[in-house]
Structures are given as C-alpha cells and as structure tokens.
Amino acid sequence: MWIVGKFGGIAKQIGRAVLVLLLVTFGITVIVRLLPGDPVTSLLPFGTPEQHDVLRKELGLDVNIFQDYWTWLKDFVRGDFGQTYTSVADGGVAVRDQIGLTLPRTLFLMLYTTVFSLIVSIPLGIFLAYKADTRTDKSISNTLFAFASIPNFAVGLALAYILGVQLELVNPVGYVPLTESVGEHFKSMVMPVLALSIGLISTFTRLLRVDTIATLKEDFVTMASSKGLSNQWILWRHVLRPSSLTLLTSAALNMGALIGGAVVVESVFAFDGLGTLIAQSIYYRQYLAIQSLIALVAVAYIVFNVIVDILYGVIDPRVRSHRGA
C-alpha cells in the first residue's frame, strides 16, 4: 500500500512540477518582452524598415505574446531551443549546440561544488553541534558567518591571484575537459569550486548544527546514551539522518541557485559554461535562447526538489509514516 501511495505522491509532484514549469516559462516570456532595447535594431542597426520587418518575423517578434509562447513551447518540447545571433551575417547558432558545449562544464561545476561543500559541512556541523556554545563553536561559527558575507566573485579573484598568479599552482583561467586530461581537468576546477563552495559550506554547516542540536535533545538520543553507546556512534548512526532533512533541502535548492553564482564565477575564470551563455543571451537580447535556457534551469530546479522529496522517506522513516497516515 505504501508503494501505491508513494507512486501517487510522485504523480502529484510531477503534476505540480509541470504546472510550475508552465507558469515560470510563461513568466519568462513576459519578462523578456519587457527588456529594454530592440534585438532587431541591435542585429541590424542600419537596416531599412522593410529589412527590420523581415528580421522581426524571422525572430518571431511579429506576433502577440501568447502566440509567441505557444510557438516556443511546441519547439522546446521537440528539442528545438531556437538560435542565437550576434549579427545578421553570422546566420545564427543553434542554442542546442551551445548547450551541448556549455552544460557539461556547468554540471561538473555544480556537482563538484555540492559534493565538496557537503564533505566539509557534514563533519564540521556535527562537530559544532557536539561543541555547542563552547568557545570553539562560537569562534568557528563566527568565522563561517564572515565567509558567507564574501561575494563569490571576490573569492574567485583572490583565489586566481594567490593560487594562479603568485603560487602558480593552477592555471587561473580556462577549462580542461575530463576526456582530455583527468589531472588537468580537476586542476581547472579547483578555483571555481572553491569560489562557489565558501558560502555553501557556511550555510550547510550552520543548518546542520542547528538541527543536530535539536535532535540531541530527543528522547531516543537519551535512551541510546543510557545504553552505553559511544558519542561517535550516537552522532553518526542515530543523530545525523534525522538532522539532515533541512541540509538536504538546502543542497537541492542551491543546485539551481549555483547557476546564478556561476554566471559571475565563470566570467572570472573564463569558464564559458551555461551561466556565461545565459548572460550573453541576455546581453544580446536573444529572446528564444533566454526562454529555453531559463526553462532548462527551471526543469533542473524542479527535478532536484522532486528527488529530495522522494528521498525524505528514505532518510527519515517518520516522514514516510506521516505521509502514509
């Protein structure tokens, strides 16, 4: 029965996700129409009115917003994400081809950043909860709070100067594919990952610390302690799982938010990932490209949240029991 209920819950999640996606993408269609400037005059600044009209029709700007959205949605579902233009002479470049080049870079960046942040945050959060209200806890917590206030681009510039220019440990700019060289690939990812991880480590650690302190006050922890179990066993076996729900939610939400941070970090390190492609599309007012790229980000954001919701019942059976009630 739980399996049936679970599949029903997943179906509802997917239904809500589709509705949210439609609302988000339509909202983007409205917003991009409100962007200042005219992409037609940007691409053809010295063209005649007749030439402007022809180009406007080619770009799909000659119809109302509802027709524009419906045409884009049909193409998007078929995998046609439109084209980008930097000038009329270039003939346009398929957004799908650009995504194929830039998306793997950003996915690696997001994955490495999240994994590294969790590897550092989980033991640190457990440790601070165990040392709650001590001088050690206050010192580390204040340091993490200070790190969280530093912008990603500032961290990136500092890392590029120290590690890349002064110490010459890594190349401060560029990206090396994993298929080209494993060692050089990871070296090229070090600074962007560190730049994005500083704030996440601070956030993840403080969230886990607060939830772990609350869990340590539960009756089952007292019972486990009365049985003579070691503190390490209690913390890692009995306390971590129920304390990690907020951390898991934050990690999933930040997977989508990382793309926003990646726009700046990718620019600092000449990374040329999906964030850079989004920024360029906005700069050149590529309406169809903006809609498609934001839609892909929204899809990823929704998928991450659905996966986390499913994992809740795996991590903490109390959630599963409550939903089944």
Image (cartoon, rainbow, N blue to C red):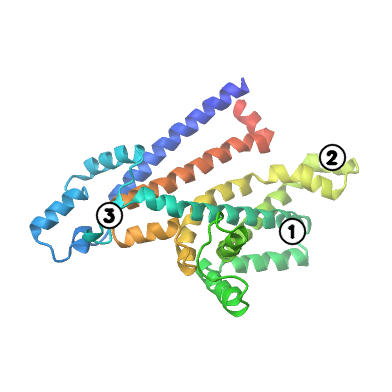
- Label 2 – label 3 distance at C-alpha: 67 Å
Point out which mark residue 128 bears: 1
- Marks 2, 1: nearer the viewer: 1
Residue 38 makes an appearance in the image: no
Q: Where is residue 177 in the image (x, y as percent from the top left)?
A: 53, 57
Q: Position of residue 160 (x, y in %)?
A: 55, 73
- Label 3 – label 1 distance at C-alpha: 54 Å
Residue 17 against residue 120 in the figure, above or below: above
Q: How busy is the neighbourhood of tag 1: few (under 14 within 10 Å), some, or many (20 plus)?
A: many
Residue 187 against residue 31 in the figure, above or below: below
- Marks 3, 1: nearer the viewer: 3
Q: Residue furthest toward the top?
A: 1
The type of residue carrying mark 1 is Leu
Q: How busy is the neighbourhood of tag 3: few (under 14 within 10 Å), some, or many (20 plus)?
A: few
Viewport quadrant of the N terminus: top right
Point out which mark residue 58 bears: none
The type of residue carrying mark 2 is Met
Q: What element carries label 2?
A: helix
